[in-house]
Structure formats: C-alpha cells, structure tokens
Image (cartoon, grey):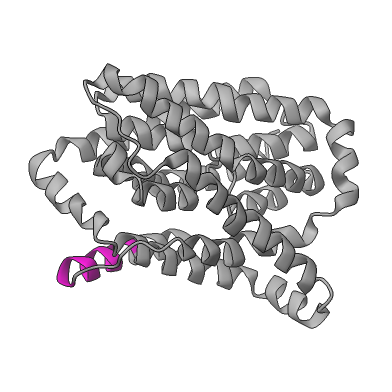
Amino acid sequence: MQLFMVIFGAVLGLVYGHNTDGFIFDSNICLFAGLTLIMPTLFNVKLSDIRLIVEHKLVIIKSLMANYLLLPVIAIGIGLATDSFGVAAGLFLLSVLSGGGMVMHWIKKSKSDTSIGFIILFINLILISLSLFMLDNFGIYMAEHFGESYADVVSVSNFAKSVIILLIVVPFIVSRVILYIKPLQSFIEEKRKYISHISIFVILFYLFGLQSSQLLFELYDFEPELFYISIFAVIAFYMFTYMATRLIFNLSSLQEKSAFWHSITRYITLALVISTFTTKTFGVAMILPIMFAYIVQIPFAIYIDKKVMHQA
C-alpha cells in the first residue's frame, strides 16, 4: 500500500507540475511532515527513558558509528563510482539521515526493543543538524573530485536551525500537549497508519510538483543514463549497508535488532525534502537516488522482516 502511495503521489506530482507552473518550495512542508509523520512517534518518547542511553550505551554508540561514519563512507565510495556529483550527493544525504516514519513499524513488527528504538530515533532527529553539516562538508571537499565547483547558494548548514524547529521542537511540544488529550491521542494512534499514508502521498505530490522537480524531464532528455546509474547505485548502497550492519549488530539481541533497523532504514522523505531545495547547489540529479530509494527500501525491508528476522 505504501509503495503504491509513493509511486502514485510522485507520478501525479510530476504530471501536475509539468502541465502547470508547478509549486514554489515552502519550508512549511517540513512542519507538515513533522506533525503528521514524526509527532505521532513521539508519544512513546518518555524523558525517563534517558536512562536507557547509559544502560545500552554500547548499542547506541554502534548505531551512531554506523549511521554517521560507516554508511557515509559506503555512500562516498559508490558515489565516486557513479562519476556524478548530484547522484553522489543524493546517496550521501541518504546515508546521514537515519530512520524515518517507517522505522518504528519494522521495529515493532520484528518484535525488537521499541524503547531503545524510540531513543535512537529521537537521538537521530536531534542530530539532523549534524547530517546537514556533513552534507555541506561533502560538497566542499568532494566537488573537485567530480570536476565541479561547490557554491552553497541556499546555505545548507544554516537551514539546520529551521529543520530542527519544524521537525523536532514543534512536533515534540505538540506531542506533549496531545498526551493530555487522551481521546485525540487514541484517535491519532488508531488511525496512524492511514495518516502516514496520506501524509506521504501529499508530501510526494507537493515535492514532485515543485518547479525544481520538473528539471528531471530535462535531465532525462540530456543525461538519461543517470537514471540507470542511480537505480544501480541505490541497490548497491542498500546491499553494502545490509552486509556491513549484519556484521556489526547481533540480531539475537532485541536492542541491537532495533539499532539494525535504524541503519537499514533511511529517512527518505526528509532526504527528498532537503534535496528539493539544494538542487541549485548539487544539481537536479541529486533527487534521483532518493526517488529510487523508495522503490528499493520498502520491498527490501519487507524481505528482511520475513526472511532475516525470523531466522535471527
């Protein structure tokens, strides 16, 4: 169902933008994503769970090392092989954005430790500013390897403040308020699956309907090979990520199983949001690996849940 909503929303957005003037990017889409995708997951975040950081510090350290060191190295290696600055940037952005709206679904479905799952989710949300800082530095130090110049025309690092407010601070405050309104909380939790699907559809329709997204048509006309390169690069990224994290995390441990899901599941929707306002910096090709990540990650997660988790 989610894959259908993803494809339908993206295609409809492209068709709409192609036949109209398209949308102009508004950062309030981050607020919409924060309230509909992130806020419901924060109901289960309790300040008392901070003790779990100390209790399971080794698992958390391994998770952070995987998400902010190992996966970026994998992304850079594959990105260099693509010989495309935009595709490499898209892969790198995926590598530094962990989790997302679906990660807790897979953690619960595989009967992993949800408490440590929520803690890692919250830590990664706080570290979004670090992810944007790393993306900025990727542009600074890697552009010359692709024969490109890097001009941070949108100030990626400065955008971190707005992202933190719209995706973390406001959703967290709203979640604390709703906890006191039990009927509303129960309704949101009961309908959360549908809210998530509708939200993803709206976000993708909007993002692919943006004026900047219409440049994908021009890219296909002049460099169609980048579409094929991107899909193979994304498949390679997820395969290498899976092999590496299987070696790092012990799936017989409920806590490490949760950390594993936070590595194998990337925050694709947020990556797409960020990529749409950085196309002037990294090129429209940056959107391609993120777009294809939806098609790869969802079936891949289903396969892991059915085949790998039941054997662990």
| Residue at 76% from the left image edge and 75% from the top image edge | 185
| Residue at 79% from the left image edge and 38% from the top image edge | 254
The residue lying furthest to the bottom in this view is 183
Q: Quadrant of the C terminus?
A: top right
Q: Which residues are magenta?
A: 10-20
247 w.r.t. 151: above or below: above
Q: Please tell me which residue lies in front, 100 or 127.
A: 127
Q: Please tell me which residue lies in front, 127 or 117.
A: 127
| Residue at 58% from the left image edge and 59% from the top image edge | 166
User: Is residue 19 shown in magenta?
Assistant: yes
Residue 238 seen in render: no
Q: Position of residue 286 (x, y in %)?
A: 31, 40
Task: Tell me if 82 is positioned left or right of 141 in this view.
Answer: left
Q: Position of residue 291 (x, y in %)?
A: 35, 48
Q: Please tell me which residue lies in front, 217 or 312.
A: 217
Q: Position of residue 37 (x, y in %)?
A: 59, 62
